[in-house]
Amino acid sequence: MRHRLRHVAVVLLGALLLGTVGLAAGSWYGGRGAVPVSLDKALSAAQELLPRTEPIGSITALGYRYGVALAPDDLGSSQVELQYGGGADCALSERLRVAAETRGWQEFRDVPGSPCDGWRAERDGMSLTLTHLAYGPRLSMEPAAPRGFLAATITGTLLGAAAGAALFWLLARRRPRVPRLVGVLVTVALLPGAAMTWTDLATDGLAEPVWPLWQSLAPVLVPASLVLLLVLVIVLAKRQKPAVPAADAKPAARAGSPGAG
C-alpha cells in the first residue's frame, strides 16, 4: 500500500511540474496577437470615465516582467499608466468604478494591495486596472487577452500534465538508479519555476503573463541542473565501481614437517 501511494505521489508531482510548464507555454501561445494600446486610446478611455479631469502624469512603456521585455503584440505589453491626484481619499477611485460599470466595462475582478478597492476590467480589447497610491488613483491600460487565450492555456496545461504524469509513472516503475536520477533532475529544474508561477497566479491570475518567469530562470537553473547532473553521475559511477578482489589466499602449508621420514 505504501509503495502504491508513493507511485501516486510521484505521478502527481510530475503532472504538477510539467502541467505548470504547459500552462506557461499555452498562455504565451494564446497571448500572441494582442492589440497594442496607444497613449491616445488610453487618454480617450480615461476621458470617457473622468470627463474634465486631467491626469497629473502619464507613462507609456512596453511590458517588462521578470527582466524579460514582451513583444508589442504579447499579452501584457504596451502599457499606459495615468496617474491622478486626490491623495488618500477614495472618492475618485469609487467614482471611476461607477463610471466604468455604466460605460460597458466588463469582467470586473478585485486587485488586492491598495488602500482603496482596486479592480480590473476589460472592454474593446483593452484591460483597465485601477490601483490607489498615496497621492491618488492610478489607471493602468494594456492589451486584453486575445480570443482563444483561455482555450490555449487550458490545452497547454492538460498536455503538460499528461506528459508529466506519464514520464514520472515510467520513472517510478523502474528500479535502477538512472530513472531516479532523471526524476531528481527534472524536479530540481522545474520546482522553483512552478512554485513562483503559482504564487504569481494566486496574486494576478492570468491577467499578467507568467511565461517570462521561466525565461528569466533559465540562465540560473540550466547551469545548476548540469552541475547537479555531473555530481550525481560521478557519485553513481563510484558506487557502481566493482569491488577490489581479495588477495589470493596464502598457499596451504605442506603436509608434514621437512624432516619427516
Image (cartoon, grey):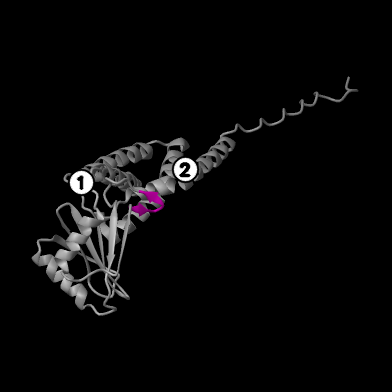
User: Among all residues in the image, which is located at the extreme top?
Assistant: 261
Q: Is residue 39 above or below residue 101?
A: above
Q: Is residue 79 visible?
A: yes
Q: Is residue 142 above or below residue 98?
A: above
Mark 2 — residue?
222
Q: Residues within 10 Å of mark 2 (few under 14, many from 20)?
A: few
Q: Residue at x 36, y 51 (%)?
A: 194
Mark 1 — residue?
149
Q: Quadrant of the C terminus?
A: top right
Q: Quadrant of residue 22?
A: top left
Measured as percent of width and height from the top left, residue 186 is found at 41, 42
Measured as percent of width and height from the top left, residue 23 is found at 28, 46
Does the magenta segment cover residue 19? no
Q: Is residue 169 above or below residue 13?
A: above
Q: CA distance from mark 2 to mark 1?
A: 29 Å
**Which of 57/103 is in front?**
57
Between circles 2 and 1, the one closer to the viewer is: 1
Amino acid type, callout 2: Val
Q: Residue at x 27, y 45 (%)?
A: 73
Q: Residues within 10 Å of mark 1 (few under 14, many from 20)?
A: many
The part of the chain drawn in magenta is 63-69
